[in-house]
Every structure is written in structure tokens, then in C-alpha cells.
Amino acid sequence: MTVRLKDIAEKLGMNPGSVSRILRGGAQAERFSSATREKVFTLSRKLGYQRDELAASIITGKTNTIGLFQSFQSGDYNYRLLNSLICEAGKYNYFIKTLNWDGWMSAEEIAKICVSQRLTALVAYGVAPLYPKLKRLLEKHGIMLILAGECLIRGMKQEPIAVVSMDGYEGGRLAFDHLYGLGHRRFAMMGFLDGAYGWFQKSKIAEEVDKYMMEWQLKRRKGFRDAAHEAGIPDKDVIDVVIEYSLTMDYDETMLKKYFKGRNRISAIFVYPGDILAVNIISRLHRAGIRVPEDVSVMTYGGTRFAAMVYPTLSLVEDPLEEIGCRCIRIIMENRTSKTPDISNFSETVPGKLIVRNSTAEYKME
């Protein structure tokens, strides 16, 4: 026999509408005491109540489905976020559908897919220029948009969009503090530029890199540089090295020997884009006869599974994607019952953590 809301309400002496609001969760459920909510949930589980999602979608115009829009494909990072979204959404009987961006699909096309799927919300991961427009299109249909991680690009700051991320600026400072604490006093910050910009200085010290980097790179880099300045490190002892982004991320090993060998060498590198570039750099250093961490310490930012499997294992500032995914789902759940949900002003930062492994060590003078 099918258990209805009316059956639960009668047994508890409550109004069916109140029972419905509690079981839907969100802001409306919070109006009831925790004891009342617990009674409703306990009895609904005992009786085996299951919400009729099809009927609910006809009434609300939405399904119990959340989309994940991915403009960035990098294995472990995507997996960590997706897994956290699936696990947290499952607690509320919600499901995740993925949508990968090929760089050509317009904001209108993406919005059309979201509306046709009757999504409750769309979580976006990775940098893309279309978020402001996509947000406005989705708002017309009551679909929430929330950015997971550091997705900002230039020009987006003026447009309020909900975001949950680690503070990249603080992550950069955390990386510097670790290396400085090991006695290092000369540093290189290594990043990449997209060749699509038509400008990069391959394997050279870069000037005016601010003009050509994504917001997430700039925040990490600025945090590191500001912390170095506050510690009294001269600007000349914190240099930028940039390479063109490609599958090989190749660069001149002569440059590596110039900056990372000898008595006045740079003894520590902060690879702020992530683990993949750090592994590539360590491999190139080894080919050039430069040992990690004996000659040069390498610090990165990310947290892939292979970071603990390569040699040497990577010291890093971990991007807390699991917690970011959980927070995104909770924000959506807290606002999903509204016909016109507005989460634009939600902005949360999740603390990252320092993981010390074998790619960093105390400075030793040659």
C-alpha cells in the first residue's frame, strides 16, 4: 500500500502541507523545530514513504536533478568534485547530470538544455567567459547557477554570481610560508599562458604576466608575492617563469640550469597552476641534473591522487574540492523551494590545507 503525505500527517496530528514542507527541506523546513522535523523524518522512514518525483516536477516545473557544467577536463580534479556532488546530493534524493563544454556551445544552448532537463540548479566548474550571460538566462526559469572553485575571469567581478571556492590568495601565502620556513630565500613562481593569447615568453622571465593570466592564477601568484614582500624578500628574488600551455609544456633546459644550479641558485619553486605542471617541471629538472628536493624544492597547488604516487611525492596546498562540492549542494538545497531563488550574493571560501611530502626540504647552501 502506497504511503501518502496525508497518512503521515494524520498519525502526527499535523497539517499535510507542513509535512510536505519539512520533507522538501530548505528554508521552509527550518521554520519548524528540530524536534518536529525529526518526528516527521523518523515516521516517513518507518512507513517507507517515497516522494512522487514525477508529480512534484509537474507542479514545480523542476526535477530532483542538478547539472554539472564542466569547461575544464583534468581527470582527478573533475572526479573529486563530481564524487562529492553525487554523494551529497544523494542525501537529499537528488541526482547529478554532467554537461561538458567544448568551447563552442553558446550560453543560450546551454540554458536550453538546462530548461529542457528541468534542472533545479547548475554547478559550474572551470573557467568560461559565458557565466554572466548564462546566469541571467537561467534566472528567467528559476534555475540557480553556482560556481565551484576558482572560475573567475576578468570582467566577471561586476556580475554577482554564487561561488564556493578556496581562497587562492591565501593558498599562495600558505605555500610561501612553508618554503620560507624551510630556509629558502630565492624563489621562482612558475605558471603557464594559453598559446591562444598569441603572446608568451617561452622559458624566459616574463614581464607583464598580469595581462595574460586567468584570475585564479593571479590570486595564487599575488598571495605568494605579497607574503614574500612582507617577509622582507626583495622583488628580484621572487621571479616569474611562464611557459606556453600545451600537452608537453616543453621549455629550454638551459634556462633551468641557469636559474636552478650554482651557489646563487633559486632554491624553491611554487608551481601555482597544479600538480601536472609540477610533475613535468620535476622531470625536466632531473634531466638537467638538478635534484628535487636536494637542489631545488618544488611546491604545488592542487591535490590529485598521483601527487602521492610520483617520485618525489608532491608537497602542495590542497584545493578542498570535496568540501566545495558539499557546500554547493547544501546552498542549493537551502534555496530549492523558492519559485525565484536568488543565490547571487552567496560567496563562501573553504579553507585549504598544507600537505608536506618529499618534494620540499630545508635549504642547503652549496
Image (tube, rainbow, N blue to C red):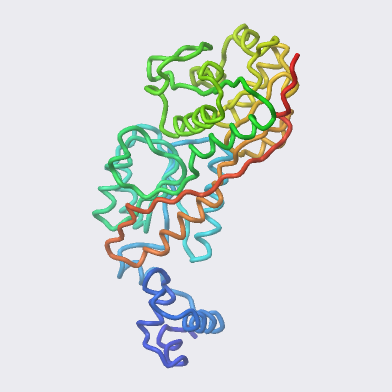
Q: Nearer the viewer, residue 7 or 39?
A: 39
Which quadrant of the rendered structure holds the C terminus? top right
Residue found at x 41% / y 45%:
124
Can you give x and y, in whole percent of width and height, for residue 282 in the image?
67, 22
Can you give x and y, in whole percent of width and height, for residue 79 in the image?
56, 44
Q: Nearer the viewer, residue 189 or 8?
A: 189
Can you name the residue that lies furthest to the front here?
A: 232
Residue found at x 53% / y 59%:
88
Q: Is residue 241 left or right of residue 311?
A: left
Can you give x and y, in whole percent of width and height, for residue 243 in the image?
51, 17
Q: Nearer the viewer, residue 353 or 242?
A: 353
Can you give x and y, in whole percent of width and height, for residue 354 in the image?
63, 41
Q: Is residue 355 above or below residue 30?
A: above
**Residue 273 visible in rendering:** no
Q: Nearer the viewer, residue 259 or 47?
A: 259
Residue found at x 74% / y 32%:
358
**Residue 224 visible in rendering:** yes
Q: Is residue 222 left or right of residue 292?
A: left
Q: Quadrant of residue 328?
A: bottom left
Q: Is residue 89 above or below residue 243?
A: below
Total numbered badges shown on the rendered structure: 0
Q: Is residue 315 above or below residue 52?
A: above
Q: Is residue 233 above or below residue 74?
A: above
